[in-house]
Image: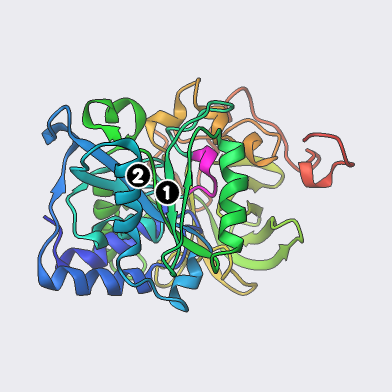
Amino acid sequence: MITEQDVAALDSGCVLLGSGGGGPSATMATLLRQRLRAAPVPFLAVADLPRDAVVVPIGFIGSTGLLDEKLPSGGELNEAIEVVARWSGVRVDAVMSLEAGGVNGLAAFCCGRPVVDADLMGRAFPRLGHMSTSRAHVAAGPYAMVDAAGRTTVMDRCDPDAGERMIRGALAASGGWAAFAHWPIRAVDLPGQAIVGSLSRALGLGRTMLSLPGRAPRAAALGGRLAGTGRVVEVNRRPSGRGTVTVLDHGGAVLRVEMENEYQVVFRDGVPVATTPDVLCLLESRTGAPIACHKIRPGHRVEVVQLASPALWRRPDRLAQVSPAAFGIEIPPCLLEDGDADDPGPAGGDPPCQNGTSRGDDLPHRDDLPDGEGR
């Protein structure tokens, strides 16, 4: 069961797994506390589900920051679930989160249904094609969207690229956000199609963060690696939506953190040392609070922390879906491996990049290429 006393830890852990994105969670945490005061929510392990149980992944999509200004009524998620159930001809037994990072790690608990300990990303990612159930050029569905006015959009037989275009068009007409329900998944299929244990990971990370004293070694306590610590000296946001955070490390190195919706790559003196799909966090040095991509500013003193990505994204057949190249940064992934998690020192160690280590200063980004190249 998840109770009101679990919300602070769940919120803290989900924000960490947001990797600088996932949307602000404070409003959703308040709504969840109100829901849990009435009754706790069953929290189910995948292994405890009947094989034929039907689970629907749910969450909010679009500009989730607008949830603070345009509050949901509380019924949108359940309406989206019912639409998918009718379209698929199934009875829904439980729900799970679209993504464990950010606001959607909390949202699944707000609809009053049993919640399964799994999601489709293991962290926060920005697009439909980054879900574990998505395959390039493979049509799937149904998906349902319900906006704050109750208007419903159903998408079926669409591949990730087509679905993303349809979602963005519908969001433009819906006020910026919508509740979203994914097609139903049988419990027996969850281990192969979802990130199992992601919400309990968020809960554990949050409990660790809340228990740490002020300046404790956070990276090691979280099971991650300290990539560097220092002061933000420059934040450059480009019209494309991408951006770069420059951190002057206390050891003298220059860290460059590439970001879009989330933090994606960390370079030290031009060498890539940490990349997506690992979870990259910029923590405020004094409090340990994660700083979101849209809130990072010059003058912030930060710890740059790398947490391991779920095993599914490390598989050779899945890594390309969420690697730096999937976001237009043409470098090999640099991921935490077994034995890398201990904090090796003030500046952190450099994990080997897969397929070799490359310097990053002269590598092209797709945003910087002439029209028609690299797209």
- Residue 211 is situated, as x and y percent measured from the top left of the image, at 23, 64
Q: Nearer the viewer, residue 351 or 366?
A: 366
Q: Which residues are magenta?
A: 125-130
- Residue type indicated by callout 2: Val
Whether residue 190 appears in this view of the structure is yes
Q: Nearer the viewer, residue 265 or 301?
A: 265
- Residue type indicated by callout 1: Ala
Number of numbered markers: 2
Residue at horizontal 54%, vertical 65%?
174
From the image, tell me which residue sits under label 2: 84
Q: Nearer the viewer, residue 241 or 79?
A: 79
From the image, tell me which residue sits under label 1: 144
Task: Evaluate if marks 2 and 1 touch, with contact meaning CB atoms under 8 Å apart.
Answer: yes
Q: Is residue 226 above or below residue 15?
A: above
Q: Quadrant of the C terminus?
A: top right
Q: Which mark is residue 95?
A: none
In the image, 346: left or right of 113? right
- Residue 61 is situated, as x and y percent measured from the top left of the image, at 48, 56
Which mark is first along the chain, 1 or 2? Answer: 2
- Residue 19 is situated, as x and y percent measured from the top left of the image, at 48, 53
Q: How packed is label 1: few (under 14 Cα within 10 Å), some, or many (20 or more)?
A: many
Q: CA distance from mark 2 to mark 1?
A: 6 Å
